[in-house]
Amino acid sequence: MTRPRTALTCCVLALAAVGCGIRPTGVTAGGTAPSGISKSMRIYFVSDTGLRGVSRPGTKVDHFQLAYRLLLNGPTEEERADGLANLVRPDKWLNVTAHHGNVTVRTPGYTAESPGDQSTGQLVCTFARAEVLLHGTRPDKVQVTFVTGKERAGPYQCQQFLSN
């Protein structure tokens, strides 16, 4: 009785292993695993679905003015064909400073009328990304405030503009 039971058990296990539907495969290369936060600068443009960040690999941002210039250069031809646009207009005088993740944008010609304004979002997200690269601030800790004369708008976080 033990021998037939053993044979039956072996047959059942063999059928189960064959019938499971999983076929052996070779090793598949998945590339290198992502590690931490991207080190490249991202500029934010508007699309029909909201803000979208695009990478500027190889661009070393060593001050906020460079991030602003990258934004003003607008989307590339390929990015425009993909539906991206720039709503930020050049301002002759713009001063951006940061202290412990608090970014202050001083400009006489800019007004942030509402937190949902996409051009405001472009500036907030672009300067927030620059702050991360310049000073190593965690992205969720960066706050951007606009100062025009005695008026202040903000502080804003990039997430506010990406969730719309």
Image: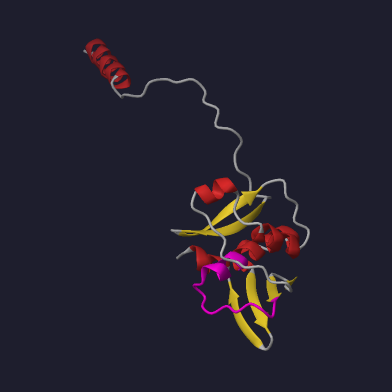
Q: Is residue 26 above or below residue 58?
A: above
Residue nearest the viewer, comparing 63 with 10: 63
Q: Position of residue 51 (x, y in %)?
A: 51, 60
**In the rendered view, does 25 fall on the left or right side of 131?**
left
Q: Which residues are magenta?
A: 106-123
Question: Residue at 73% across / 50% down in the picture?
Answer: 59
Q: Is residue 161 left or right of residue 101?
A: left
Q: Looking at the picture, how far across and down is residue 148, in whole percent?
A: 67, 83
Number of marks present in the image shown: 0
- Nearest the eye: 122 or 2: 122
Q: Is residue 58 above or below residue 16?
A: below
The image quadrant of residue 35 is top right
Viewer-side residue, 17 vs 130: 130
Q: Is residue 134 magenta?
A: no
Image coordinates of residue 162 in percent, x first then y, are: 50, 63
Q: Is residue 73 above or below residue 121?
A: above
Image quadrant where residue 78 sits: top right
Q: Residue placed at 67% from the left, 50% from the top? A: 40
